[in-house]
Amino acid sequence: MGIIKRIRQAIRKRKASDFGALVAPAYDPLTRRTSTWAHSWNLQDVALYRRGDARHQEALTLITRTQSQANLFFFVGHGSPSGLFTDPQIGKVPSPISNRYHGCLLDTDDLVDSIRDLHVVAWSCDSGRYFGQRVAAIPGSAFLGFNGKVNLVFNDPDSERLWGTAMRLVFERVRMNRGIRQTDKAWLRKFLLELRDKIASGEVNTGHYNRINSMFLKSAARRIC
Amino acid sequence: MKAAPALAPMINLNRDRIASKFKRALLVDDDVDYGQSISDNLSSIGVKTDVVGSLAAAVEHLVVDPYPIVFFDNIFEDRPELKGSEFIRDETKLLKNSEVVLMTGYAVQQIANSNDLEKRGVHIVRKAPGHIEEIKSICEKAIQSNIDRFTSQFEQFCSLMLDRIHDPSDIEGLIPEPRLLRRARTYLLDYLAKMPNPELEQFYFEGKSYSPRELAAEVAAGSRPGAILLEQFLDDVLEGSETAGEQSNGYH
């Protein structure tokens, strides 16, 4: 790795100790795309952890750090009811949630008593079912995510723009508010349904994918938790 | 009232098959040897037991497929702050169709009182000599009660069907109208067949990546993902917008 790249990475990580972190693992066709989207967002004051950086130890350090304000942890990738996934080669071993396709980035066992003021936004399947509940039970903490499967369209530029923008705006909102607010679930649901309406009215056009994007937006809106 | 003759041959309950569905248990205990010993004992009465070592792993199993019987240890050495009894108290939705057994080596009554477990029908078993027999007995009763309940519900359902179905309008609204379903399925298959990149993985759907062609194959085969997609499609086109003031954007 070149010296400039290393310095940039160090700066990004130092920033992480002050603000938030976005973890976007890249290890299968979908996550390789979402990780690229995450890279293009350039969220201000949010350090990006992708590919080899999206490892368990790194994530554990991020959620256990203490800050003067809410600790923002954003995630985009695959999830399970009791945790978040990363590349199987850099995941936590052993973990009840890991399998041959997915390694464990974080599971509920990582939510130790010392954690405080942790705000997790996870754009991933299922993680709201139990992991999210456990996060929300931590003092001063909150979780925004989904309690079912989250479907999306990728490898199509217009659809990627639609889904990538939706994700970016959610993360951006929580970053600007310095945490998750009580109204954010309702806001996200309304926002996804409005995107669907924009497809119906032609304001947003994903061509032949309009119908399936509309279906997926509606199912995502219903599964927010 | 005359029963519909065509339904009669279908109403033939395979009791052995039904029993096998209920002879499954999940054991949540971080003591692997103890778990194995319980599993061996339960297999002697025909119960297949899956053993997991943490509450997080239990969730992974329970959300995928609820178990008729679930055993919990109370204290886990790696997470002493999260007790089995509290998990049972908090996760009522996850355990609503299961017979729940809490196994503990400590004061049984105190645990029961502190979490209102007995009121909610949770069995509390003290890990003491002879408790294996108690566990077996709970399992046998739970299996029998499940079979009885299922059989009774099934018979009620059959009798209702035989008495009532003389006119298709009796069951209107209970199942999707077949013509509508067929039309929606044809439209969906046609829509997927016309995707610009039929071989390219483009859809992340219900936990798996699909190309349009693969997704169409699921719909054509009537598999679970295919059925979910068809359901979502119908939901999308029939309900239209969920926000106020918008009209349905039905398909043509």
Image (cartoon, grey):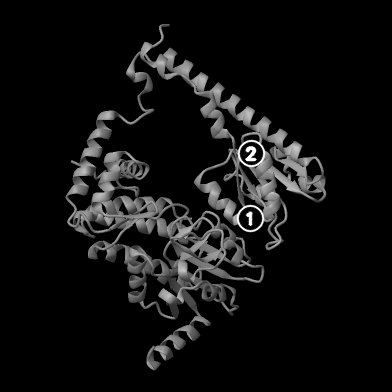
- Amino acid type at circle 2 is Ser
**In the figure, is residue A15 to the left or right of B47?**
left
Residue at 75 percent of width and 37 percent of height: B134
Residue A217: mark: none
For discs 2 and 1, the disc positioned in front in the rendered view: 2
On what subunit does the disc labeled 1 rest? B
Residue sitting nearer the eye, B1 or A77: A77
Mark 1 falls on what kind of element?
loop
Q: Position of residue B175 (x, y in %)?
A: 36, 29
Task: Place residue A169 in its image quadrant.
Answer: bottom left
Q: Quick check: B5 above or below B176?
A: above
Residue A206 sits in which quadrant? bottom left
* Residue B217 visible from this viewpoint: yes
Whole-percent x and y of residue B72? Answer: 68, 48
Q: Is residue B65 above or below residue A189?
A: above
**Viewer can see residue B89:** no
The N terminus of chain A lies in quadrant: bottom left
In the displayed structure, A222 sits above or below A39; it is above
Q: Do pointers 2 and 1 mark residues of a single chain?
A: yes
In the picture of the structure, the residue carrying the numbered disc 2 is B43
Mark 1: amino acid:
Gly
- Front position in the image: B110 or A182: B110
Circle 2 SS class? helix
Q: Which mark is residue B53?
A: 1
Q: Earlier in the sequence, mark 2 or mark 1?
A: 2
Residue that appears at 25% across and 38% down = B184
